[in-house]
Image (tube, rainbow, N blue to C red):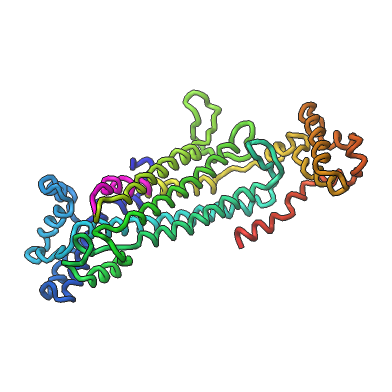
């Protein structure tokens, strides 16, 4: 992923240095297990472990690979330069996928730790904003049209609940890929004892794959990347909400505009929702990795490497992008500028029409049929739409309405506190 959308902590996980360090750890732990079994001479593992503080030369490994056309063999050849004669016992009974797949899952697991940390920050930002505006009344919209009042706090509580579900999903995804395999060619353990797999996985914080067929089944990875895509879609959903709320005709909230920031090269007045628009685009990139990950499930027989080129791209890209996006969204929410007075103005734009359901229900309670009550209220509502008169006044002067509802009853239908009476219950459900 390009540096513009990358953060150093996640990039480091997917660096060549980290990959080779993990490869080395897998091989060294395997040597320790082999020595315990008596499969290699005593003292071999200790000598292999002497290389643990070395920084492997990525350029040198690439140079060797240009000849061998095999990345694991190139690494082992480079490692032999440090280990010496005992290098012949490294990788004994193993196959390349034992190293590659186990390493890939470790990198995904490490990525999850960072993603979960960023999700915690985002959740805290959403919670803070939700409680700050718990009773900040605003108009709710369906189909983009004014519906009934809600609060800005409820909007943020909904986003919090969604992201909390996503965090739980990510924990499940981390468990799903926390498996390793050291099972040899075609996964039968014919050349390596299952104890080696158990030992290596325990040391590396993984669970042995029950049956690996030489590769770890890719349905695990498809699940992982699908969860990243769902999280990205939730990021986009909230970003689109902010973009709509920042429109000039609405302006109920907007991204923080810093000193010296420029919105347009042509129009000096512009303050654009660039962060949320950026997050919308980045979410598309995260989601596009799902289809390749699903197609990676279908490998030939015990293995092929059609998945390899895919994962070399989507592994780092999807995780780096989502890490960046979560961090950006957290900052956006923490610094979001909210305009309660504009929310109040927009709430009153339709001259009280947002209370139409209250009037409908009141008429029904007084004995009118639902069909007739709907007809009466809609007729008055359409008059208000067309004339811009106050909905309350039209209703109060309507013979059919006044026959059933007193002035006090009608006024009660326009009490906005009615819409806020269960906000605490919603917050208790979300935040406990």
Q: Is residue 399 magenta?
A: no
Q: Main secondary structure of the magenta part?
A: helix
The structure residue drawn at horizontal position 40% and vertical position 56%, both measured from the top left corner, is 114
User: Split into 4 quadrants, where in the image is the N terminus?
Assistant: top left
Q: In the picture provided, is 172 more to the left or to the right than 419?
A: left
Residue at (74% x, 49% y) in the render: 419
- The answer to whether residue 388 is left or right of residue 49 is right
Up the image or down, 209 lies above or below 323; here it is: below
Extreme-front residue of the structure: 301
> Which residue of the protein is positioned furthest toward the top in this rendering?
266
Residue farthest toward the left in the current orientation of the protein: 85
- Residue 338 position within the rendered picture, expressed as x and y whole percent measured from the top left: 62, 43
Percent of width and height locating residue 107: 32, 56
Which quarter of the figure is the C terminus placed in? bottom right
Using the rendered image of the protein, determine whether residue 204 is visible from the camera's viewpoint.
Answer: yes
User: In the rendered structure, which segment of residues is drawn in magenta?
Assistant: 303-318
Instruction: Establish if 369 lies above or below 248.
Output: below
Residue 123 location, x and y as percent? 53, 55
Q: How many marks?
A: 0
Query: Quarter of the image holding residue 360?
Result: top right
Which image quarter: residue 29? bottom left
Q: In the image, residue 238 lies at what x, y percent?
A: 54, 44
Residue drawn at x 72%, y 39% as measured from the top left: 347
Q: Quadrant of residue 81?
A: bottom left
Asked if residue 88 lies left or right of residue 326, the reply is left
């Amino acid at each position: 992923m390009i540096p513009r959308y990358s953060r150093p902590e996640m990039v480091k996980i997917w660096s060549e240095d980290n990959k080779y360090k993990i490869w080395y750890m897998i091989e060294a732990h395997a040597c320790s297990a082999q020595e315990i079994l008596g499969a290699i001479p005593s003292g071999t593992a200790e000598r292999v472990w002497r290389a643990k503080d070395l920084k492997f030369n990525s350029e040198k490994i690439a140079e060797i690979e240009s000849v061998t056309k095999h990345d694991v063999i190139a690494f082992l050849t480079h490692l032999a330069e440090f280990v010496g004669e005992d290098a012949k016992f490294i990788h004994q009974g193993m196959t390349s996928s034992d190293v590659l797949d186990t390493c890939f899952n470790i990198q995904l697991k490490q990525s999850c730790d960072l993603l979960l940390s960023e999700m915690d920050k985002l959740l805290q930002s959403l919670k803070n904003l939700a409680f700050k505006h718990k009773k900040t009344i605003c108009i709710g919209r369906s189909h983009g049209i004014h519906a009934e009042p809600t609060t800005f706090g409820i909007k943020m509580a909904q986003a919090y609940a969604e992201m909390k579900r996503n965090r739980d999903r990510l924990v499940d995804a981390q468990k799903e890929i926390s498996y390793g395999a050291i099972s040899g060619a075609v996964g039968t353990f014919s050349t390596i004892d299952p104890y080696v797999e158990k030992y290596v996985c325990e040391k590396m914080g993984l669970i042995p794959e029950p049956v690996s067929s030489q590769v770890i089944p890719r349905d695990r990875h498809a699940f992982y990347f699908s969860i990243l895509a769902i999280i990205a879609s939730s990021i986009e959903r909230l970003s689109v909400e902010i973009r709509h709320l920042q429109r000039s005709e609405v302006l109920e909230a907007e991204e923080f505009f810093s000193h010296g920031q420029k919105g347009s090269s042509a129009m000096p007045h512009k303050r654009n929702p660039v962060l949320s628009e950026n997050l919308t685009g980045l979410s598309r990139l995260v989601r596009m990795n799902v289809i390749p990950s699903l197609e990676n499930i279908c490998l030939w027989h015990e293995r092929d490497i059609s998945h390899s080129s895919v994962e070399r791209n989507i592994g780092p890209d999807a995780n780096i992008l989502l890490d960046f996006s979560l961090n950006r969204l957290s900052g956006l929410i923490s610094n979001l500028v909210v305009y309660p007075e504009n929310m109040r103005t927009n709430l009153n734009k339709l001259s009280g029409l947002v209370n139409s359901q209250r009037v409908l229900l009141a008429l029904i309670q007084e004995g009118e049929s639902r069909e007739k009550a709907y007809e009466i209220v809609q007729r008055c509502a359409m008059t208000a739409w067309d004339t811009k008169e106050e909905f309350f006044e039209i209703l109060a002067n309507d013979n059919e309405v006044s026959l059933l509802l007193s002035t006090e009853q009608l006024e009660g239908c326009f009490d906005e506190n009615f819409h806020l009476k269960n906000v605490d219950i919603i917050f208790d459900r979300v935040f406990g």
